[in-house]
Image: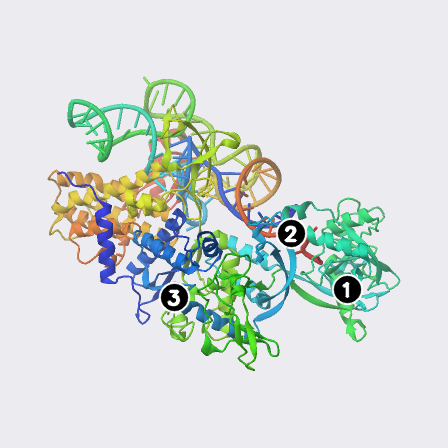
RNA sequence: GCGGGUGUGGCGGAACUGGUAGACGCGCCGGACUCAAAAUCCGGUUCUGGUGACAGAGUGUCGGUUCGAUUCCGACCACCCGCACCA
């Protein structure tokens, strides 16, 4: 019989409405079932969703719908990372208020997301730009401050003198501002910091507990935190200039090599260098030059190691008869360690280059095992390995490790001026988190600056400090600072006229706790509700977090810090790690097409391109003119390359289910997926095929009870059904959606012929029962991935309620194994045939049966086998 | 430079703890249905040789362990990603 094509344009809105009306995805905090929190990284409201969102949210939705079917109370919320610079740029360029621009974008994107049919609890929607959200953020800022986790200090920042704002490192390109093109200056500004370094060790240790995170991300964070063990060594300055500290303190991980030291180097910003520069024009000029080359990464790589001999000397800590010259050097960083180091040329390549350039001695003090101390020299290549100590007096003959300990023991015991000469010290590469931004569209820092009282917190009762709405963007700089009245207030402490802090918080702060806010977004009094946020009846940690690898460090590290800080200030009970399971999905990539060549070449959108295959070669032409196009590399979808496919076009053309199915098929979720027209069409064909099978079979299965068959031909259907149930469940739990998709295709291939025969009038009672179960199962297993089609199939079969309310059936273990198994039979490790035998046959009978096979007899040529290996349920190998 | 990952048919990829390499999809080839086309359904599709049964080769390269290696070990090649003057 003829069936109508499935029409997603009619079905999808219908089921979306039905779910909404049944409030299926609204989650109650007091639901007693086991909790499961599924979260995808919330989007920035740019105004349009892109394919990356579709992929991300399709994956999360599969997990959420599956967990729901497995009986969990699932929290699956959505919100908006709504503060940020693009709104201000739009305001400046189009004279739109950033707030209006943002909320219009949110409305547009929300409408788009709704068409995807995601099982989201929209009742918990939050936008970080809403005062009802940032109010609590301001409260937590103040709580953190009181708890000693916030600090106001001077910092070097990238200052764009044209835009009059601070730039993040990634916004500085070749030393110039990315927008203005102006040469970026290093400025000292007093800024607010979150003291993330105070938790460096906890953040490092916590990584070991995150066994459901990708190893790659944990490693990146480990490196970012950059723990190293060493010692702070205090060198006495022999001829300290007036006003200088008589000691030069430096951090070293290689105190075993101290006898190889031949110079000291300090940063141009080291107090000693700054002091000396006031008396020495040449040095001042040198330091200034160093500061200017200090921005671009690529330049740094190539930059020559340069130094300036200050004429100051220090006494060697282990040999006071030796003097070491102090240089100001361009490669010493002020914000690592103490901004000073001792140079040991023989065992550090950078120090060796420096020593060779300035004619400083190179004294090898560590020698590889087996080398001859009389002849061992270091000239061009520093020796970085371990070995035996030489030229090191009391250390000679020790291993590097022994020498390290010996030096540490000796120097920590020795004192000069009542203080030890050295102390053991753990150093981290991690820096404190600078959160001040000189921008309008962000969370105001709730602080008032008073001449008499200093920085004073805004009283809790006066929170939130709201952003003013009447702002202008017609001149560079911070609109909050320009605003005629906003910043002028009275000091909460003394009542005298004072000014508000006009900086706003880094938007990474907003995204560092939104997952906690979702657990009770209705609480007006506090950021979180302790009963719901975590603990025995709370939601955190997020069981499965899904998002892009680009947030591997900052967002995830900041969130891990934030939750610890929230715990310290009583905003969560016990959790420290916000995300129990993390999954980083790959990008959506697409071919690129170009018209013309060289400088006049332009990129062409895929929608305007026709691809034809001639003799196995793919040719691209521009549809409108027929011009030939060059097919370029497959790259991340981007506006600049125009290789973007709009989710709206796909969803309105093929439906959301097709888009979702395609996103989950083929490519493993953590790898890039190549978007192709052929692939989408293939996905859509399967949507139609499932519908055809179900709608064809449904009339013949009316009133039939689903019943698995254990023998006869119908058992093949039931076995396929239960195997699919097992495979799909396992693949979702492993987040290997592509293999689940394959399992579903396989089931369809088994059911297809049976349905054909059914429609032709055949099939007994057993088969009809098995088929009914199979098709109901098909609807259930596709439901997490293609929820609308699943509902339509479920309805056609006459199942009760909606498929979104059905439990995931348990597979019958008896049906996923065969009574008879087919074992491959190898001769000398090469497969030569099969042996079909009862599943429970013992080892001996398997061996006898295998030896009876004629191809085995033939291979043995009458001789007894040298060995027969029988791996139960697996394989037989005959060694001839 | 340091650290990590990946490499399997024409393509995307599958293969659990060492046990039939290529599941499933795309593409392609053939057939059925049709006046014809689309859609759909059925069959085939790693390579080489052979009409064929079959034989040989085969998971980046070379070597090792093993009855047996995509899987374990060593060396190398290619590509991708992260960090990068961190003392």
Q: Is any atom of residue A144 visible in this view?
A: no
Real-space Cα separation, disc 3 to disc 2, in angstroms: 39 Å
Horizontal arrangement in the rendering, residue A753 relative to residue A126 (left or right): left
**In the image shown, does A385 or A95 lie closer to the viewer?**
A95
Residue B15 vs A158, above or below: the answer is above
Residue A503 vs B79, above or below: the answer is below
Horizontal arrangement in the rendering, residue A96 relative to residue A846 (left or right): right
**In the image shown, does A221 or A125 lie closer to the viewer?**
A125
Residue A412 vs A755, above or below: the answer is below
Horizontal arrangement in the rendering, residue A96 relative to residue A778 (left or right): right
Residue A477, image x and y in percent?
Answer: 55, 59
Q: Is the residue marked by circle 2 packed among few (<14), some (14-19), or many (20+) residues within 10 Å?
A: many
Residue A595, image x and y in percent?
Answer: 45, 31
- Split into 4 quadrants, where in the image is the C terminus of chain A? top left
Residue A547, image x and y in percent?
Answer: 43, 54
Mark closest to the chain's N terminus, 1 or 3: 1
Residue A756, image x and y in percent?
Answer: 17, 38
Front disc: 1 or 3: 3
**In the image shown, does B77 or A558 lie closer to the viewer?**
A558
- Split into 4 quadrants, where in the image is the N terminus of chain A? top left
Residue tagged 2: A295
Q: What element carries label 3?
A: loop
Q: Looking at the image, do the residues carrying marks 3 and 2 touch, with CB atoms under 8 Å apart?
A: no
Chain identifier of the residue bearing label 2 in the image: A
Residue tagged 1: A407
Real-space Cα separation, disc 1 to disc 2, in angstroms: 37 Å
How many numbered discs sit on the rendered protein?
3
Q: What element carries label 2?
A: loop
Residue tagged 3: A518
Horizontal arrangement in the rendering, residue A79 relative to residue B35 (left or right): right
């Amino acid at each position: 019989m003829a069936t109508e094509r499935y029409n997603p344009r009619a079905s999808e809105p219908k089921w979306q409405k039905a779910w909404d009306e049944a409030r299926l995805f609204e989650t109650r905090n007091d639901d007693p079932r086991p909790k499961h929190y599924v979260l995808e990284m919330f989007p920035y409201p740019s105004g349009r969703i892109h394919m990356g969102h579709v992929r991300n949210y399709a994956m999360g939705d599969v997990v959420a719908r599956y967990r729901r079917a497995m009986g969990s109370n699932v929290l699956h919320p959505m919100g908006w990372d709504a503060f940020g610079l693009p709104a201000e740029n739009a305001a400046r360029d189009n004279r739109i208020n950033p707030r209006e621009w943002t909320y219009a974008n949110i409305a547009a994107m929300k409408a788009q997301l709704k068409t995807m049919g995601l099982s989201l609890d929209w009742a918990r929607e939050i936008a970080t730009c809403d005062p009802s959200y940032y109010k609590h953020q301001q409260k937590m800022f103040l709580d953190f401050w009181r708890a000693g986790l916030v600090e106001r200090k001077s910092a070097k920042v990238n200052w764009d003198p044209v835009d009059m704002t601070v730039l993040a490192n990634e916004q500085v390109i070749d030393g110039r501002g990315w927008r203005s093109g102006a040469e970026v200056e290093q400025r000292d500004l007093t800024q607010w910091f979150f003291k993330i370094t105070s938790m460096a060790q906890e953040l490092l240790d916590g990584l070991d507990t995150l066994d459901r995170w990708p190893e790659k991300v944990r490693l990146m964070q480990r490196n970012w935190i950059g723990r190293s063990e060493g010692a702070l060594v205090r060198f006495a300055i022999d001829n300290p200039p007036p006003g200088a500290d008589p000691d030069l303190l430096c951090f070293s991980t290689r105190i075993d090599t101290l006898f190889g030291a031949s110079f000291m180097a300090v940063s141009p910003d080291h107090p000693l260098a700054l002091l000396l520069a006031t008396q020495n024009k040449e040095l001042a000029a040198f330091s200034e030059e160093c500061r200017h080359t200090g921005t671009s990464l690529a330049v740094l790589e190539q930059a020559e190691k340069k130094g300036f001999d200050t004429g100051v000397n220090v006494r060697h800590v282990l040999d006071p008869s030796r003097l070491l010259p102090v240089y100001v050097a361009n490669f010493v960083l002020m914000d690592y360690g103490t901004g000073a180091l001792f140079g040991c040329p023989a065992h550090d390549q950078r120090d060796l280059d420096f020593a060779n350039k300035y004619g400083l001695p190179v004294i090898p003090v560590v020698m590889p095992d087996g080398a001859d101390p009389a002849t061992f020299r270091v000239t061009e290549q520093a020796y970085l390995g371990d070995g035996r100590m030489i030229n090191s007096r009391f250390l000679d003959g020790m291993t590097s490790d022994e020498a390290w300990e010996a030096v540490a023991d000796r120097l920590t015991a020795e004192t000069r001026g009542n203080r030890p000469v050295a102390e053991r010290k753990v150093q981290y590469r991690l820096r404190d988190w600078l959160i001040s931004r000189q921008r309008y569209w962000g969370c105001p820092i709730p602080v008032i600056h008073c001449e008499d009282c200093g920085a004073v917190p805004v009283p809790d009762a006066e929170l939130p400090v709201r952003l003013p709405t009447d702002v202008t963007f017609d001149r560079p700089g911070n609109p909050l600072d320009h605003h005629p009245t906003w910043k002028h207030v009275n000091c909460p402490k003394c009542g005298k006229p004072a000014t508000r802090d006009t900086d706003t918080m880094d938007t990474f702060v907003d995204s560092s706790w939104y997952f906690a806010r979702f657990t009770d977004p209705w609480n007006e009094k506090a950021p979180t509700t302790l009963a719901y946020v975590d603990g025995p009846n709370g939601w955190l940690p997020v069981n499965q977090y899904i998002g892009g690898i680009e947030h591997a460090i900052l967002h995830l590290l900041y969130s891990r810090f934030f939750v610890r800080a929230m715990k310290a200030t009583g905003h969560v009970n016990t959790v420290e790690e916000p995300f129990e399971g993390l999954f980083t999905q790959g990008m959506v990539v697409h071919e690129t097409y170009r018209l013309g060549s060289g400088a006049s070449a332009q990129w062409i959108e895929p929608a305007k391109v026709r691809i034809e295959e001639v003799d196995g070669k793919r040719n691209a032409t521009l549809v409108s003119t027929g011009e030939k196009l060059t097919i370029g590399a497959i790259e991340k979808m981007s506006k600049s390359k125009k290789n973007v496919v709009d989710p709206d076009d796909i969803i309105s053309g093929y439906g959301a289910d097709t888009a979702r199915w395609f996103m989950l098929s083929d490519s493993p979720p953590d790898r890039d997926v190549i978007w192709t027209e052929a692939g989408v069409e293939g996905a859509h064909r399967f949507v139609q095929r499932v519908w055809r099978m179900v709608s064809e079979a449904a009339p013949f299965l009316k009133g039939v009870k689903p019943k698995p068959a254990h023998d006869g031909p119908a058992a093949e259907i039931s076995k396929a059904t239960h195997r699919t149930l097992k495979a799909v469940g396992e693949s979702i739990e492993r987040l290997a959606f592509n293999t689940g998709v394959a399992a579903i295709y396989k089931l369809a291939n088994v059911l297809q012929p049976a349905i054909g025969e059914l429609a032709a009038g055949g099939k007994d009672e057993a088969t009809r029962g098995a088929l009914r179960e199979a098709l109901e199962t098909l609807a259930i297993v596709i439901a997490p991935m293609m929820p609308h089609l699943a509902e339509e199939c479920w309805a056609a079969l006459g199942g009760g309620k909606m498929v979104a309310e059905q439990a995931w059936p348990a597979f019958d273990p008896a049906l996923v194994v065969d009574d008879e198994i087919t074992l491959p039979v190898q001769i000398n490790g090469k497969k030569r045939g099969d042996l079909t035998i009862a599943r429970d046959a013992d080892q001996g009978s398997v061996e006898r049966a295998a030896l009876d096979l004629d191809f085995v007899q033939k291979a043995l040529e009458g001789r007894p086998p040298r060995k027969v290996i029988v791996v139960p349920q697996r394989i037989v190998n005959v060694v001839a």
